[in-house]
Amino acid sequence: MSDLDDASLLELLDLTFDALCASRVSDWVDPDRVLAAVDLALTPGRVTDWHARLGIPLRTRLLARAAKSGIKLGAWLPAEATASLTALLGQPVHLPRKAIDEMVASEQVRETVRTTLQETCPRW
């Protein structure tokens, strides 16, 4: 067998890619087995475990790195995204009446308002 040079290897990769694109996914993967595995992997308990083990530490590390960085998020966003966010954030938010009623009835909100008033208003 002769050694493959770069051109031969690229041609082999191109032919392999073309063959894969011409075939159906079901020729290579059994959909029923994949769906069964996904259903098993995405039970609420497992998702909670994955989130606690990977998601929370990742978020914590990213927030810590972002807090130390002098580069703001806007530097990473394309101009179109920045313009869209600016327009979206400049619009008033419509809160459903039910959400407002729940907030007003919340003891936590009442305690926060009470504390804020006590700290900002002079005592008579």
Image: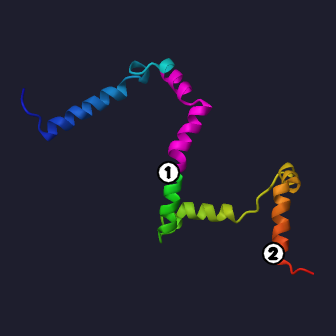
- Real-space CA distance between mark 1 and mark 2, rounded to the nearest whole angstrom: 36 Å
As helix, strand or loop, the secondary structure at mark 1 comes to: helix
- Mark number displayed over residue 58: 1
The amino acid sitting under disc 1 is: Leu
Do we see residue 77 in this rendering?
Answer: no
Q: Residue at x 48, y 19 (%)?
A: 33
Image color mode: rainbow
Instruction: Name, please, the residue furthest toward the left.
Output: 2
Q: Of callouts 1 and 2, which one flags the residue occurring earlier in the amino acid sequence?
A: 1
Task: Answer few, some or many: residues within 10 Å of disc 1's Cα (few below 14, many 20 plus, some between 14 and 19).
Answer: few
Magenta span contains residue 55: yes
Q: Give x and y (percent) for residue 42.
A: 56, 31
Residue 100 rendering spot, x and y as whole percentages = 85, 54
Quarter assignment of residue 45: top right
Q: From the viewer's perspective, is the residue at label 1 or at label 2 nearer? A: 2
Q: Is residue 7 visible?
A: yes
Identify the amino acid type marked 2: Glu
Vertical position of residue 12 compared to residue 51: above or below: above
**Residue drawn at (62%, 61%) of the image:** 85
**Percent from the top left, x then y, of residue 17?**
30, 32
Residue interval drawn in magenta: 34-57
Q: Which residue is mark 2?
A: 119
Mark 2 element type: helix
Q: Position of residue 114 (x, y in %)?
A: 86, 67
For this rendering, which residue is in front, 101 or 85? Answer: 101
